[in-house]
Amino acid sequence: MQTLRDELRTVPSIVGTAPDFDWASTPEGPRDFFLGWLRDALDAGVAEAHAATLSTVDSDGFPDARLLIIKDVTDDCGFKIATSDESAKGRQLLHNPHCALTFYWSPLARSVRVRGIAQRASATESAEDFLARHPQARAIALAGQQSSVLVSDTALDQALTQAKAALAANAVATSPQWAVWKIVPNSVEFWQGEPNRDHQRLRYIRAGSTWDKQRLWP
Ligand SMILES: Cc1cc2nc3c(=O)[nH]c(=O)nc-3n(C[C@H](O)[C@H](O)[C@H](O)COP(=O)(O)O)c2cc1C
């Protein structure tokens, strides 16, 4: 009988095809590089190309990670995300802003790793993001308690009904717990899988106002 281990060994990995890329002429900083790869992923129709895994550290020093959507990349290469202060990730970022983002665009055999420090955006920016959300997403955020233990469906229904009523009464109601964060990278690594497993890796390390570039062993 085939074991799971045997079966997993037969499953192909790094199955995507990387576009041609000139590693000799990479940009001076990671922002343009990232935007170029994100553009390639969007143009190739990669599903949820703006999704990334956000890794954080809890107050006991344990790592945690989950998928989310990035909202923007700023001119100074800050990666914008948004979440509730009440969620596990929100609490973890408030306690320890050291974090990482990992993107994977499987069809292009490309991944990007960002390590940095999250900065909470202004209340105005967070409120703007909140108001731009889908009405149901706003109601859920206003109901709060993301990542808390759900004791019953009734509790959720009641909280959502209250949140929807609050939004119906005030179309510009916002949640003080909703926060945009800007992840300011210390390093950004670009990884591209090659069929012969001679994978390409290039890491940018922040050096004051400029960036050092390092090729890495595959
Ligand atoms: C593709 C994908 C995108 C997601 N996008 C978001 C997001 O933008 N914001 C968010 O709070 N959760 C998002 N989630 C849900 C999170 O993965 C997670 O379940 C939730 O945020 C609670 O995480 P926490 O308990 O670590 O705070 C997404 C999940 C998936 C699979």
Image (tube, helix red, strand yellow):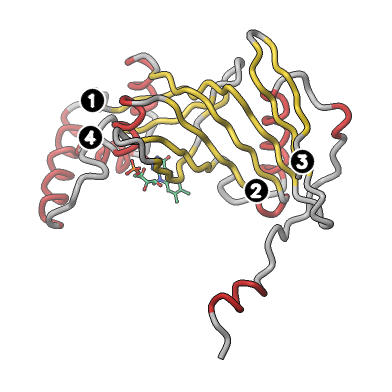
Q: Which residue type carries mark 3?
A: Trp
Determine whether the residue tagged by mark 1 lies in a helix, strand or loop: loop
Residue at image position (69%, 67%) is 12
Q: Are discs 4 and 3 less than 8 Å apart at CB?
A: no
Residue highlighted by disc 2: 105
Q: Which residue type carries mark 4?
A: Leu
Q: Quadrant of residue 107?
A: bottom right
Disc nearest the viewer among 3 and 2:
3
Label 3 – label 2 distance at C-alpha:
21 Å
Label 2 – label 1 distance at C-alpha:
36 Å
Q: Position of residue 169 (x, y in %)?
A: 16, 29
Q: 30 or 3, which lies in front?
A: 3
Determine whether the residue tagged by mark 4 lies in a helix, strand or loop: helix
Tell which circle, 1 or 4, labels the residue nearer the N-terminal end: 4
Residue at image position (22%, 34%) is 142
Disc nearest the viewer among 1 and 4:
4
Tell which circle, 4 or 2, labels the residue nearer the N-terminal end: 2
Quadrant (top left/top right/bottom left/bottom right) for the C terminus: top right
Q: Position of residue 138 (x, y in %)?
A: 29, 36
Q: Is residue 4 above or below residue 142?
A: below
Tell which circle, 4 or 3, labels the residue nearer the N-terminal end: 4
Disc nearest the viewer among 1 and 3:
3
Q: Are discs 1 and 4 less than 8 Å apart at CB?
A: yes
Please give left or right for residue 66 compared with residue 115 in the image: left
Residue highlighted by disc 1: 173
